[in-house]
Image (spheres, helix red, strand yellow):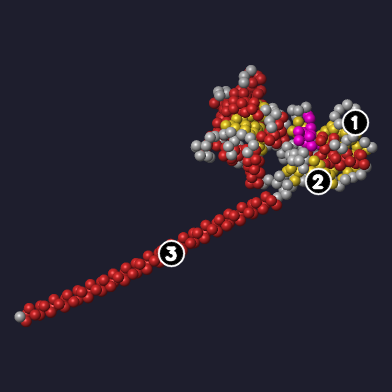
């Protein structure tokens, strides 16, 4: 009996110790679960803090973006516009005519810009009579905040009375005004400049009075070396070119903003538009009979403006440009500044080779120093061999421009959006049309 009693006590002791251990284990488990809960609470709080920090960072980035947008808009607002060369030439001519009539100098001339319809005040530096029937006035170019090489260049105008047959206002180019080498050496004084000078001066003439106006750019010959005038057949000076009297202060981003604004305005009025890379294209397009209100200047920004035109619902675009620029689109180059990409000789040589031009001739085209030189070689070859390589090669390039332009638009837009129809017209440095694509021909008939 004593033995069994001893065993019972041992069992009771063991059970007691086991229950104590179990209690301690449950206490430990409870403490662990409490710790885990606290850790999860800390993790939740940390994630909340991280979320709040990311929200703050997002808000800060939004504020920074808004500030940069405001600064950009302020820079545009604060940029100062100026005037184009024809305006200063016209102002100097008016000042010289005033001297002839009144023998008094004017310090400031009011000139009607015509495009746009506003009056500009142009300061005159000097006015003097140079004979009984002639006077000279001098002003200075101020294109505003543009990076324009004509900034501060002097502009002279002489005006003299004349009698005899002819127009009431005869305009001539003197020293520093470029000559059109394929235009019978005529002065490079184009449509807008001619109109600006003629209309402003005719208002000041009595019936029967006639004058000869000579524009002189003393620095024109040296400044012309830094331009691409020679590529367009203008030598020995600058062109009085442009379609407006206002010279906008366009940096690279400002330029695209201005062109987009012009495109948006015109797309709201017309379903068919004409894209012109530069002033030569704008001038030639108008001479072809295209409505100036349908012309959009693009400079080198053809790609983004093509896409935007499509988004704005423009149905048809005629690409109207100098072949040395426009052919880059056939190679998939949609920003045409030569600092970004060239590829002209490769594009020309590739189309020549595809069409079967003999390899020796392809090599000459490939090694031509300019697109104009390559074009001349093809034309010379046609003359010698009674072939039509020029039409074949440029016809192929024009067709490719149309195709690649539409592919470019599609690649940047929702596939469900209808793609703008594109046609092309390429002209040479003499402002003579080389080729029209098939679509280009159709669009030209509609637009002219």
Q: Residues within 10 Å of mark 3 (few under 14, many from 20)?
A: few
The residue at which mark 1 appears reads as 208
Quadrant in the picture for the N terminus = bottom left
Displayed quadrant of residue 378: top right
SS category of the residue bearing label 3? helix
The residue sitting at the left extreme is 1
Estimate the x, y position of residue 224 in percent, counting from the top left. Answer: 75, 38
- The CA span between labels 2 and 1 is 28 Å
Displayed quadrant of residue 35: bottom left
Q: In this view, does 117 lie to the left or right of 396?
A: right
Which mark sits nearer the N-terminus, 3 or 1? Answer: 3
The residue at which mark 3 appears reads as 46
Q: Give the range drawn in magenta.
A: 185-197
Q: Which residue is drawn at 50% across and 59% down?
A: 55
Estimate the x, y position of residue 130 in percent, counting from the top left. Answer: 91, 39
The residue sitting at the front extreme is 269
- The CA span between labels 2 and 3 is 66 Å
Q: How many marks?
A: 3
3 vs 394, nearest the viewer: 3
- The CA span between labels 3 and 1 is 92 Å
The residue at which mark 2 appears reads as 121
């Amino acid at each position: 009996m004593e033995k069994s009693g001893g065993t019972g006590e041992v069992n009771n002791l063991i059970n007691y110790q086991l229950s104590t251990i179990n209690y301690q284990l449950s206490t430990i488990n409870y403490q662990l679960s409490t710790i885990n809960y606290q850790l999860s609470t800390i993790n939740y709080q940390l994630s909340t803090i991280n979320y709040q920090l990311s929200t703050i960072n997002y808000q800060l980035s939004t504020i920074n973006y808004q500030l940069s947008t405001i600064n950009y808009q302020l820079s545009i607002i604060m940029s100062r516009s100026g005037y184009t060369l024809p305006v200063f030439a016209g102002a100097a001519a008016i000042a010289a005519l005033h001297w002839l009539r009144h023998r008094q100098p004017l310090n400031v001339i009011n000139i009607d810009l015509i495009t746009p319809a506003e009056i500009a005040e142009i300061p005159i530096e000097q006015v003097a009579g140079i004979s009984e029937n002639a006077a000279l006035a001098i002003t200075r170019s101020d294109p505003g905040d543009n990076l324009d090489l004509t900034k501060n260049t002097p502009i002279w105008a002489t005006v003299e009375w004349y009698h005899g047959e002819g127009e009431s206002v005869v305009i001539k180019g003197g020293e520093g005004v470029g000559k059109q080498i394929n235009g019978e050496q005529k002065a490079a004084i184009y449509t807008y400049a001619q109109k600006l000078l003629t209309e402003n001066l005719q208002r000041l003439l009595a019936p029967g009075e006639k004058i000869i106006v000579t524009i002189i750019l003393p620095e024109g010959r040296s400044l012309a070396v830094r331009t691409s005038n020679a590529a367009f057949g203008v030598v020995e000076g600058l062109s009085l070119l442009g379609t407006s009297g206002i010279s906008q202060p366009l940096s690279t981003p400002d330029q695209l903003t201005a062109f987009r604004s012009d495109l948006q305005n015109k797309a709201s009025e017309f379903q068919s538009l004409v894209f012109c890379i530069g002033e030569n294209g704008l001038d030639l397009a108008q001479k072809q009979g295209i409505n100036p209100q349908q012309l959009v200047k693009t400079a080198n920004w053809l790609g983004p403006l093509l896409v935007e035109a499509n988004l704005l619902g423009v149905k048809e675009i005629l690409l109207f440009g100098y072949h040395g620029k426009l052919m880059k689109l056939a190679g998939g180059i949609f920003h045409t500044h030569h600092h970004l990409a060239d590829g002209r000789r490769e594009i020309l040589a590739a189309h020549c080779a595809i069409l079967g031009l003999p390899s020796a001739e392809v090599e000459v085209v490939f090694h031509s120093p300019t697109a104009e030189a390559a074009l001349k070689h093809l034309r010379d070859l046609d003359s010698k061999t009674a072939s039509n390589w020029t039409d074949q090669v440029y016809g192929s390039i024009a067709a490719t421009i149309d195709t690649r332009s539409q592919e470019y638009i599609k690649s940047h837009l929702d596939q469900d959006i209808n793609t703008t129809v594109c046609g092309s017209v390429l002209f040479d440095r003499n402002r003579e049309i080389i080729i029209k694509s098939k679509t280009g021909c159709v669009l030209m008939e509609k637009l002219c």
